[in-house]
Amino acid sequence: MVSRVSKVLKPQHVNQVFTGVATSRALLGEDETVINGLISPTGKVGLVNIATGPLSSQQPDAEVPIETAIALLKDMGGTAVKFFPMKGLKHKDEYKAVAEACAKYDFNLEPTGGIDLDNFEEILQIAVDAGVKKIIPHVYSSIIGDDGLTRPEDVKKLYEIVKKVLD
């Protein structure tokens, strides 16, 4: 579904399950759009689960070295790893290994899941310290108010943290 919608809309950014990256790239017919591939923590530093598609996610984990996952994503036309669910800093050591591999192989990183104002700086700093060139943290519900709207003051705080870390 994401791939078919992307073909029509031609977005600048596509969030995709691991197995959908190649289809999205092919249907887009260009290499400008950022396409991330979803990989998940395994509880083992250096190994990630690539079974994140609609069918594969219902099967036993497909654990591969993060370097292999990045190479496969590059083969399929992906431009970023979406590491989810991070559960904040629960998988900190695994996240560090992912960040280091992304830096080593010149790949973008999109940390996702449980990121809030309390852990955002450390999550961003880990990626910066590893040398990742492009980092797209996904911050969701932690900055949404009870009214369902994004709290502008929280966005401002996130922006200030980004400026602090990147200075």
Image (cartoon, rainbow, N blue to C red):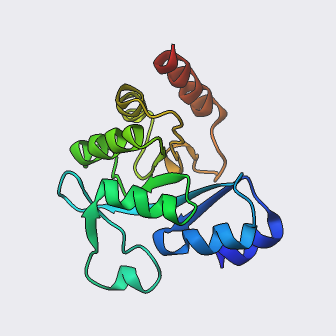
Left or right side of 148 for 104: left
Q: Residue furthest right?
A: 8
- Closer to us: 86 or 156: 86
- Closer to us: 84 or 31: 31
Residue at left 65%, top 67%?
25
- Where residue 134 sits: x, y (%)? 54, 37
Residue at left 28%, top 74%?
62
Left or right side of 86 for 93: left
- Where residue 85 sits: x, y (%)? 37, 58
Residue 84 is at least partly visible in this image = no
Left or right side of 141 for 122: left
- Where residue 29 sits: x, y (%)? 75, 67
Residue at left 50%, top 58%?
74
Residue 59 found in image quarter: bottom left
Residue at left 58%, top 71%?
22
- Closer to us: 7 or 165: 7
Whether 36 is drawn above or below 29: the answer is above
Whether 56 is drawn above or below 26: the answer is below
Indicate the quadrant containing the N terminus: top left, top right, bottom left or bottom right.
Answer: bottom right
Whether 158 is drawn above or below 91: the answer is above
Left or right side of 79 for 81: left
Residue 109 is at least partly visible in this image = yes
